[in-house]
């Protein structure tokens, strides 16, 4: 099942020429809207709710107003949006089946995928996952894009794989050490998102990600992201305080480049070290070895690379 309550209520709200308070109050309490608010990590959700309400009022009043949550895109495509939601409601099982087929090309078949899927609209992300089981998809980015919707579903389903309890305990014990925790926030998350993007797009990016996180241009200038990564890792290694570099780091690009190179030459088994065990060291080691063998720059500082795989 795919929960479309949030989007269906936005449609009803945008079809009126005034903000219907009753509809709005139901909408803001839907699981999709509440998940979005939680994801935004607002200190005070009442502020975010009030802002969403004001933005909806403005776009209903002014047909040319473009709000920060991008509800205006839904308003401009209401007919297509209604057709999409009808199709999703009638064919949810099929869409999930297709998405799972993509996931299990990378994830071992015996590994369960847990999912409760909710559609919402707002923000920059294409989607996100909470607690490895609640999947939220920003449908505003996928209106009229059925194939891309399936692709983002498969991406988030990768994040929803059920890890063995023993491996989770080992991982949690490791990140109690500050250095390991910071490495997870950089290299670990890069590998996690890289494999999710591999599930979503395959090893060759044919079309820019609609969220904007992974594009062909990003891949062409990836050296800049690796330079940022090297600076961050050097600070972690030296126990220095991190600055704003992390906010500039595109973990999608770094991770996708690393895992797609490995996948093309070695297949999926090495990636299982992260998928199952949440261990990135063998993946980095294999990436460095493959690049060296093929005469290609790893873009990772040699000193850093040796430190990462020790």
Image: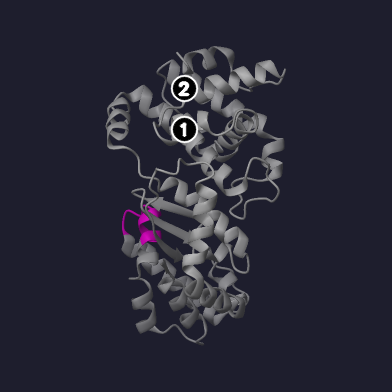
- Residue that carries the numbered disc 2 in the rendered image: 281
Q: Residue at x 52, y 56 (%)?
A: 99
The residue tagged with tag 1: helix, strand or loop?
Answer: helix
Q: Earlier in the sequence, mark 2 or mark 1?
A: 1
| Quarter of image, res 40 | bottom left
Please provide the residue range marked out in magenta: 35-44
Q: Which quarter shows the N terminus?
A: bottom left
Q: CA distance from mark 2 to mark 1?
A: 12 Å
Place of residue 244 in the rendered image (x, y in percent of width and height, measured from the top left):
49, 34
> Which color mode does the image show?
one colour
Place of residue 69 in the rendered image (x, y in percent of width and height, measured from the top left):
51, 64
Tell me the crowding category of disc 1: few under 14, some 14 to 19, or many 20 or more residues within 10 angstroms, Cα based.
some
Please state if 40 lies on the left or on the right of 97 as rendered: left
Q: Residue at x 51, y 41 (%)?
A: 193
Could one spot residue 124 in this view of the protein? no
In the figure, 196 relative to 146: above or below?
above
- Residue that carries the numbered disc 1 in the rendered image: 272
Tell me the crowding category of disc 2: few under 14, some 14 to 19, or many 20 or more residues within 10 angstroms, Cα based.
some
Q: Nearer the viewer, residue 257 or 59?
A: 257
């Amino acid at each position: 099942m795919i929960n479309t309550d949030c989007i269906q209520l936005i449609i009803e709200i945008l079809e009126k020429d005034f903000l219907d308070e009753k509809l709005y109050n139901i909408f803001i309490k839907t699981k999709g809207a509440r998940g979005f608010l939680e994801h935004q990590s607002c200190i005070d959700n009442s502020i975010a709710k009030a802002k969403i309400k004001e933005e909806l009022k403005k776009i209903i009043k002014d047909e040319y107003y473009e709000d920060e949550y991008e509800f205006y895109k839904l308003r401009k495509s209401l007919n297509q949006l209604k057709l999409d939601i009808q199709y999703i409601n009638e064919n949810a099982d099929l869409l999930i089946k297709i998405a799972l087929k993509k996931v299990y090309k990378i994830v071992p078949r015996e590994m369960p995928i847990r999912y409760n899927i909710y559609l919402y609209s707002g923000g920059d992300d294409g989607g996100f996952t909470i607690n490895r089981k609640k999947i939220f998809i920003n449908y505003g980015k996928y209106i009229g894009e059925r194939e891309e919707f399936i692709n983002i579903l498969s991406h988030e389903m990768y994040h929803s794989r059920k890890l063995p309890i023993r491996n989770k305990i080992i991982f949690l014990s490791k990140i109690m050490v500050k250095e390991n925790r910071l490495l997870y926030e950089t290299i670990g998350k890069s590998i996690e998102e890289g494999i999710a993007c591999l599930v979503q797009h395959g090893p060759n990016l044919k079309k820019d990600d609609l969220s904007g996180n992974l594009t062909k241009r990003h891949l062409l200038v990836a050296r800049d992201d690796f330079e940022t990564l090297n600076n961050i890792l050097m600070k972690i290694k030296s126990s220095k305080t991190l600055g704003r570099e992390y906010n500039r780091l595109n973990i999608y690009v770094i991770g996708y480049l690393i895992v797609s190179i490995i996948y093309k030459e070695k297949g999926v088994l090495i990636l299982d070290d992260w998928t199952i065990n949440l261990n990135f060291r063998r993946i980095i080691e294999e990436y460095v070895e493959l690049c060296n063998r093929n005469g290609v720059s790893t873009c990772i500082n040699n000193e850093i690379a040796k430190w990462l795989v020790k």
